[in-house]
Each structure stands twice: as structure tokens, then as C-alpha cells.
């Protein structure tokens, strides 16, 4: 970890080899690095590199006349269908570099009835990547009238032609029907697709390792394929020849089909040739700092052992309701809450995954805490995604998409009434990574005051957490810590807590 000094809101924070950052009000408190003789890294370095600089097409080749950046939308790569290409040139924009195994993350937005594709391991940019590359992963406005009959709920295309599909070979998952909580289905284009409506931004993560491919769209795994099962000689579902199906290296490309599709935040993590699916990023298991209890580090059994569900039924998400209820009533309601836990919180790729679906809600520590210190990693996987931490059962340390919606950083004490009390609700700065990237929280709570570091940056400086549930009372002296449901898929890992 880089040694640095952080100044925020008048409080100096010194991170040294002997002690993690503590603000001036925490003098004398011992961070985990003091006890174990090593510094717990205050941020996550996943090793991704940018493929698009946000300004021009440096590092890209092919249909450069058709693609570019509109000065009115800096940082956004676009396909401009009205720009003419030289006769005979394909409308594909490809990387100058070749890649073997990799993880690719990007954001995209579709116009109505938009169509494009992601070429994987393109060996010859002058040939159709759907067949001569390893594959084309479809990008489509799945619910557009050209592709889906919404009135009769009938697809107009083959299953292997919708977004995320290995074109002509493996269909993507399209079961997003009556699953979303709080009316969030209105965000999606329709037909069971996980693509959002035209004009809305989507986040996609693609893993390509050996012959295997996984596609995650807005947090959901929609395609999982092993192309070694096909010869590519006409044995695929489309009965076409795919001579590039077993390519082991090649370029990555956007395959234009005359639509004004947009992309941003395109980044890649190259992986070694011997990488294996399930053993690569985003999993990053850390050892617990000395004195901390492990609440999650990748073991599926930790969910039932360390965590309980939370239910809003009967107001049992509120500490005062639980405190006033009989032991029998609490046990009855806990069974309901734990059913939601078991159905909606799972281990995925070594991470604690919340699907955000209807019927699911927050997760809470089985143990109550007074003063405590906490480390945890988290990531949101949908644009404008939302979550948070409840401290002693009270909302909340905010988690959200700081870059695409509010332009206010995560970590703030969202429910504080700043105008009335003077207790800040907003984070001191934006320290968030991009959507889909991992973030690390370090939280210290003493009495009713909270300090929060996000990716090593002080974002809440010894600030009172107000009690949203009972505004005239302080937060409870001891209560559970919660991972919040806000109807969006989230992932968590490396969750460690220590009572102070």
C-alpha cells in the first residue's frame, strides 16, 4: 500500500506502515495493521487497462471513418451510421492488439432497434467475425419492434440472436419476467431480456478463457458456454460453418450494423494462457486482519452461519419493532426473513451475490455490535445501482453509482438531516471506482459517530449517524450490521468485523 497523508474536513489522516488511517478523533485507536504487523491494503487493484481513451480511436483499426467521439458527448465511443465507409470495407472497429484469455468490462447504450456485436478473437478483420472469429456476442435492442412482438409476446429472431448470445451457437438467458422488485422491470426493454431500454446505459462483463465464455449483463449471468463442444463444421444450432470457433488469440471488435450504438469505460484485464474459469478475477480472497472475525471470504457455509435474513413484514426491519416483540414472534419472523436469505443470497465466483429479485431483502449479522471496526469489498453491477450498509440496524452508509446518477460519492451517511442537525449526509469526495469494479470500505463506529474510508480516501470524518427510525433518539447502543437490499444485484467479499 502506498504511504500517504490525507487531509479532509480539517482532520489529518496518516497512513503508515504501523497503523491504518485514523482521523484526529480516533487518536489512540489501533487499526488492524498495528496488531498483525502488516498493512491491510486500503484499496483494490484489479489490473484492468483501458481500451478507449475517451478522446479518439488510438489503439483501434478498421472502420475508423464510421466510429468516433462526438464533442458533445466526451468519453463516449459511437458508431455513426450516416458516415460512409470506403467501398467494400466492413463496418467493424477492431483493436490493434490481439488477446488470448481476458476479462472485458464496458458500458453500452442502444438506440431503438439497435444492432451491433462484440467480436471475440478476430483473426482476420476483413471477414465476418460471427463465423471467422471465435465468435460474435450479440448486442441488440432485444425488445425492439424489429426483433420482438410485444403485443403477442413472440420473438421474431432465433434464441441465439439476442444480446449476449454466442451468435448462431449458444442462446443467452431471457427469463427476466416478473422478477424485479419495486417496479424495476420498467427499466428493461422487454421479452425477458436483461438489456435496458433504448437510451439507457448497460454494464456488461465478458470472461473469455480457453474455450469457455461467460457473459454478465447488468449483474446477471446470461450466457455460459464451452465452445469446445462444437466442431464448427456445421454442427452448431445455426448449421453454419464457424472456422474461427477455436481461435486461441485474436482482436476484439465492435461489429457495426448501421446503428448509433454507444460505449464507454471499455477496459480489459489480460489473463495468462493457463488461466481457468472460476479461478480468476473478480475473486480476490484476503486474509482477515488480526483480531477481526471473518463474516465472508468465499465459503458458502458462511452465509447461514454468520448471517440472518431481514424482512420488512410487520416492520421487523426496524430495531424498535424487534426489541418490542416477544422471543416467539421474533423467531417466527426470522424464519420468513431467512427464507428470503436462502433464496436470494448466494456465492457466485467466490463472492457473496445478491440477485435483487422480488422476495429478497437485506442480510444482517447474527451478532449485534456496539463500537466496531469493519472492512468489506463491494461492487454494484448495474448503472444507477444502489445499496448500502446499515450500522446498528440504522440506515445508512450509502453505496450507489456515483458516476452516472447523483455525482455524489458513496460512503456518505445518506439519511442524516444536514439542514436541521449540521451532520453531513454527503461523502466528502467521490472515491468510487466505475460500475462493475471493486471498492473497499473501512468503517469505524464509536458511540454514534462514524468514519468511513473508501478506496483509501476519507469520505466521512467522525460524523454522527442519525437514527432515521426514531429521529428524536440516538442510534441503538448495540444492534446488527446489514448489507442493504435496494433492488439491484450486488456482490460482496472480504467482510471482516471487530468489536472495539
Image (cartoon, rainbow, N blue to C red):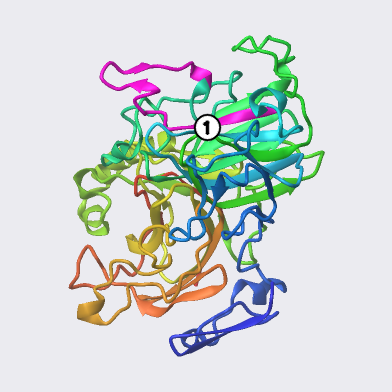
Q: Is residue 217 above or below residue 484?
A: above
- Indicate the quadrant where residue 462 lies: bottom left
Q: How many marks?
A: 1
Query: Around disc 1, counting alpha carbons within 10 Å, would you say few (fewer than 14), some (14 to 19), or many (20 or more)?
Result: some
- Indicate the quadrant where residue 396 lies: bottom left
64, 346: nearer the viewer: 64
424, 292: nearer the viewer: 424
Q: Residue at x 21, y 72 (%)?
A: 473
Question: Residue 211's spot in the image, x, y percent?
Answer: 73, 28
Q: Is residue 100 visible?
A: yes
Q: Which image quadrant: the N terminus?
A: bottom right
Question: Residue 347's spot in the image, x, y percent?
Answer: 55, 39
In the image, residue 154 lies in the stretch drawn in magenta: yes
Query: Magenta region: which residues?
Result: 134-160
- Indicate the quadrant where residue 138 lies: top right
Q: Is residue 369 above or below residue 166?
A: below
Question: Residue 397's spot in the image, x, y percent?
Answer: 39, 64
On screen, residue 104 versus residue 461, left or right, reads right
Residue designated by label 1: 257
Amino acid at each position: 500500500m502506498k504511504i500517504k497523508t490525507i487531509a479532509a474536513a480539517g482532520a489529518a489522516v496518516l497512513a503508515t506502515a504501523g497503523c491504518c488511517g485514523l482521523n484526529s478523533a480516533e487518536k489512540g485507536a489501533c487499526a488492524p495493521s498495528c496488531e498483525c504487523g502488516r498493512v491491510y491494503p486500503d484499496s483494490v487493484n484489479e489490473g484492468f487497462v483501458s481500451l478507449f481513451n475517451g478522446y479518439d480511436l488510438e489503439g483501434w483499426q478498421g472502420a475508423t471513418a464510421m466510429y468516433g467521439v462526438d464533442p458533445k458527448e466526451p468519453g463516449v465511443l459511437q458508431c455513426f451510421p450516416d458516415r460512409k465507409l470506403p467501398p467494400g470495407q466492413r463496418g467493424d472497429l477492431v483493436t490493434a492488439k490481439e488477446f488470448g484469455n481476458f476479462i472485458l468490462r464496458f458500458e453500452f447504450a442502444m438506440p431503438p432497434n439497435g444492432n451491433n456485436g462484440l467480436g471475440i478473437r478476430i483473426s482476420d478483420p476483413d471477414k465476418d467475425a460471427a463465423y471467422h472469429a471465435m465468435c460474435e456476442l450479440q448486442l441488440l435492442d432485444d425488445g425492439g419492434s424489429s426483433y420482438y412482438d410485444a403485443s403477442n409476446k413472440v420473438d421474431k429472431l432465433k434464441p441465439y440472436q439476442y444480446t449476449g448470445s454466442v451468435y448462431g451457437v449458444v442462446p443467452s438467458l431471457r427469463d427476466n419476467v416478473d422478477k424485479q422488485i419495486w417496479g424495476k422491470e420498467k427499466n428493461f426493454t422487454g421479452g425477458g431480456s436483461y438489456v435496458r431500454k433504448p437510451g439507457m446505459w448497460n454494464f456488461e462483463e465478458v470472461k473469455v478463457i480457453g474455450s469457455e465464455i461467460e457473459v454478465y449483463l447488468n449483474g446477471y449471468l446470461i450466457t455460459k458456454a464451452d465452445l469446445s463442444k462444437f466442431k464448427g463444421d456445421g454442427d452448431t444450432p445455426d448449421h453454419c460453418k464457424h472456422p474461427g470457433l477455436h481461435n486461441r488469440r485474436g482482436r476484439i471488435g465492435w461489429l457495426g450494423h448501421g446503428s448509433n450504438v454507444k460505449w464507454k469505460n471499455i477496459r480489459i484485464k489480460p489473463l495468462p494462457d493457463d488461466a481457468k474459469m472460476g479461478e480468476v478475477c473478480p475473486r480476490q480472497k484476503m486474509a482477515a486482519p488480526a483480531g477481526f472475525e471473518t463474516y465472508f471470504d468465499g465459503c458458502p457455509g458462511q452465509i447461514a452461519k454468520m448471517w440472518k435474513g431481514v424482512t420488512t413484514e410487520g416492520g421487523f426491519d426496524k430495531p424498535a419493532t424487534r426489541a418490542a416483540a416477544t422471543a416467539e414472534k421474533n423467531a417466527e419472523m426470522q424464519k420468513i426473513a431467512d427464507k428470503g436469505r436462502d433464496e436470494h443470497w448466494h456465492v457466485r465466483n467466490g463472492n457473496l451475490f445478491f440477485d435483487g429479485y422480488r422476495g429478497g431483502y437485506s442480510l444482517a449479522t447474527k451478532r449485534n455490535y456496539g463500537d466496531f471496526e469493519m472492512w468489506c469489498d463491494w461492487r454494484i453491477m448495474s448503472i444507477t445501482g444502489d445499496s448500502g450498509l446499515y450500522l446498528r440496524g440504522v440506515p445508512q452508509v450509502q453505496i450507489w453509482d456515483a458516476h452516472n446518477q447523483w455525482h455524489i460519492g458513496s460512503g456518505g451517511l445518506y439519511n442524516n438531516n444536514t439542514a436541521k442537525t449540521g451532520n453531513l449526509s454527503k461523502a466528502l469526495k467521490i472515491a468510487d471506482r466505475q460500475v462493475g469494479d471493486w471498492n473497499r470500505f473501512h468503517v469505524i463506529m464509536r458511540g454514534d459517530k462514524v468514519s468511513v474510508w473508501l478506496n483509501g480516501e476519507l469520505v466521512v470524518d467522525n460524523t454522527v449517524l442519525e437514527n432515521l427510525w426514531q429521529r428524536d433518539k440516538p442510534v441503538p447502543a448495540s444492534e446488527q450490521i446489514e448489507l442493504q437490499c435496494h433492488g439491484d444485484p450486488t456482490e460482496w467479499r472480504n467482510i471482516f468485523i471487530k468489536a472495539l
